Amino acid sequence: MDFASKIRDVVDFPKPGIVFKDITPLLQDPRAFQTAVDVIADRHVGSKLDAIVAVESRGFIIGSALAYKLGCSLVVVRKAGKLPAKTISTRYALEYGEDELHIHEDALQPGQKVLIADDLLATGGTVRATGQLIRQLGATPVEAVFLVELNGLGGRELVNDIPCFSLMSFDVEE
Ligand SMILES: O=P(O)(O)OC[C@H]1O[C@H](OP(=O)(O)OP(=O)(O)O)[C@H](O)[C@@H]1O
Ligand SMILES: Nc1ncnc2[nH]cnc12
């Protein structure tokens, strides 16, 4: 399956100088979306995961499909002010800004093994922050999975303590 042909480049979004990798054409193609989820899920069939931790907002799309397919619980990591109960949080840098991520403090139990799901790995700030929240709750991120990885922004290096798998990658200049 040629997944890369289903990703659209949008130049200067959300800021001048950023080439935004738009996953919506892939999502709109039923066979491409289904195959993408299957390829990622197949890596973890039988691996006794406790939860998929999906990152707001595009991570919810792939994360919820994986949780359904693998029969694990779905835990959401959200931006500030979105989760209703008591949370722990961390601030982090993105390719185009800075943000804050939260997780409910009772979302994971010590010793649980989880998979982080997001649509895209760029600088790695989001996944590193998510890994920190997971570890603060005593759980372990066994892998982080993505549809798209941007090579050249140092993402994989930044999250060097969590193995990363991406379905496709693109070279970008820093
Ligand atoms: O590797 P990084 O440099 O951290 O960038 C990757 C993150 O950036 C995007 O999220 P964004 O915060 O734009 O939120 P969205 O999914 O709600 O659009 C993307 O969905 C990843 O979560
Ligand atoms: N270039 C990019 N395209 C889409 N999502 C992103 N998240 C961070 N950088 C991105």
Image: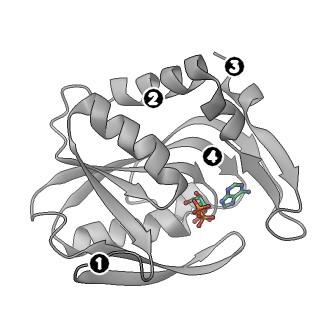
Q: Residues within 10 Å of mark 4 (few under 14, many from 20)?
A: many
The residue wearing badge 2 is 37
Q: Which quadrant is the C terminus positioned in?
A: bottom right
Question: Alpha carbon of mark 3 to alpha carbon of mark 4: how far?
Answer: 15 Å
Between the C-alphas of marks 1 and 4, the distance is: 31 Å
Identified by mark 1, the residue type is Pro
Relative to 29, is 65 above or below? below
Q: Is label 2 in a helix, a strand or a loop?
A: helix
**Residue type marked 3:** Asp
Residue sticking out furthest to the left: 110
The amino acid type found where label 4 is placed reads: Glu
Categorize mark 2 by other alpha carbons within 10 Å: few (<14), some (14-19), many (20+). Answer: some
Q: Label 1, secondary structure: give it.
A: loop
- Counting from the top left corner in percent of width and height, residue 84 is at 29, 78
Cα–Cα span, label 3 and label 1:
40 Å
Label 2 vs label 1: CA separation? Answer: 29 Å
In this image, 72 relative to 13: left or right?
left
Q: Which residue is mark 3?
A: 2
Residue appearing at x 54%, y 53% in the figure:
58
Q: Quadrant of residue 169?
A: top right
Residue 23's spot in the image, x, y percent?
Answer: 67, 41
Give the residue at mark 1.
Answer: 84
| Residue 27, position as x, y percentages in the image | 61, 33
Badge 2 or badge 3: first in the primary sequence? 3
